[in-house]
Amino acid sequence: MDDIRVGFLQIAPTGSVAGNLEKGKIYCKKAKEKGVDIALFPEMWSSGYRIPEDVEELKELSVGRDSDFVLCFQELAKELDMAVGITYLQTWEPLPRNTITLFDRHGKEVYTYAKVHTCDFGEECRLTPGDDFYVAELDTGKGMVKVGSMICYDREFPESARILMLKGAELLLVPNACPMEINRISQLRGRAYENMVGIATVNYPETQPDCNGHSTAFDGIVYRPDEAGSRDTLFMEADGSEGIFIADFPIKEIREYRSREVHGNAYRHPAKYKLLVEEEICEPFIRKDYRK
């Protein structure tokens, strides 16, 4: 199959849900003009990653899965013949969720995923965590590809990408809203390496508080038969500016690489990992604000 082109919408929010809707539509159309197969928004685009301290204000800022905001991008995906990963502060009980809904090029919902690892040490303590990770086949027009999502802080837990890989994901779509510096980028490099998976992470530009752009694309391919030694799996890193950044993911090569290399699920010993599902937390890792 041909490479899958992801459009990283590294764009700044406008300050309102209505403004973000209109700006998002404009940039989706620009992405289509660039031949994009999947357009991906940064984390919680509907609110511009704004989480009010007042709970009533927070709930008023949220939008439902069937809101005009989300449905507009569903129709736009169908109109443009392009998959769209739209992110939003989702109306939920008892508190809103940090969510991505992926629509395929026909406007069909592929999955809706809510961030599992909410940043409970900060303002995300006012959000409801998600409860599972999802993988589904996405019809791109260039062929089917198995996709799943993590959101920002999910990246910092190896289990997130591992579960997605075990469910069959070949490409991870990762909305983000934080400074992408060497260590966070290194985490993504590790997730791509150990799972032999492509990872597309889109951030807000440097004009957004506590963000710096540097959206990244990793293909997970460490070794190529015709190249000596290992290679960096990072093949696209944006600067800090606002704009659409493009990465072409070599899905066919990723599949061939996975069929012969030693990572992923090739040589694991799950029966020996029982401690990983133990829920007891001991010092020095006990935190009063931890939520199950």
Image (cartoon, grey):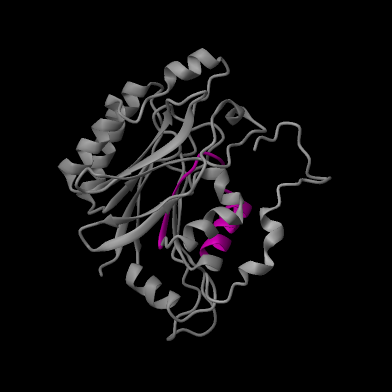
Q: In which image quadrant can residue 250 be found?
A: bottom left
> Residue 262, how many percent across, how many down?
54, 78
Residue nearer the viewer, 119 or 201: 119
Can you say which quadrant of the picture contains the N terminus? bottom left
Q: Residue sitting at 71 percent across and 31 percent down?
A: 289
> Residue placed farthest to the left in the image?
79
Q: In this view, does 234 lie above or below 19?
A: below
Judge left or right: residue 121 versus residue 101. right
> Residue 77, how many percent across, how many down?
22, 42
Judge left or right: residue 277 versus residue 27. right
> Residue 138, how many percent across, how many down?
29, 55
**Residue 115: in magenta span:** no
Q: Total label count?
A: 0
**Residue 175: in magenta span:** yes
Q: In this view, does 50 lie above or below 223?
A: above
Residue nearer the viewer, 125 or 281: 281
> Residue 15, how many percent across, how many down?
41, 22
Q: In this view, does 215 lie above or below 18?
A: below
Q: Residue sitting at 67 percent across and 64 percent down?
A: 273
Q: In this view, does 127 lie above or below 9?
A: above
Judge left or right: residue 191 versus residue 91. right
Q: Residue sitting at 53 percent across and 38 percent down?
A: 211
Residue nearer the viewer, 284 or 122: 284
Image: magenta residue range: 170-192
> Residue placed farthest to the right in the image?
283
Can you say which quadrant of the picture contains the C terminus? top right
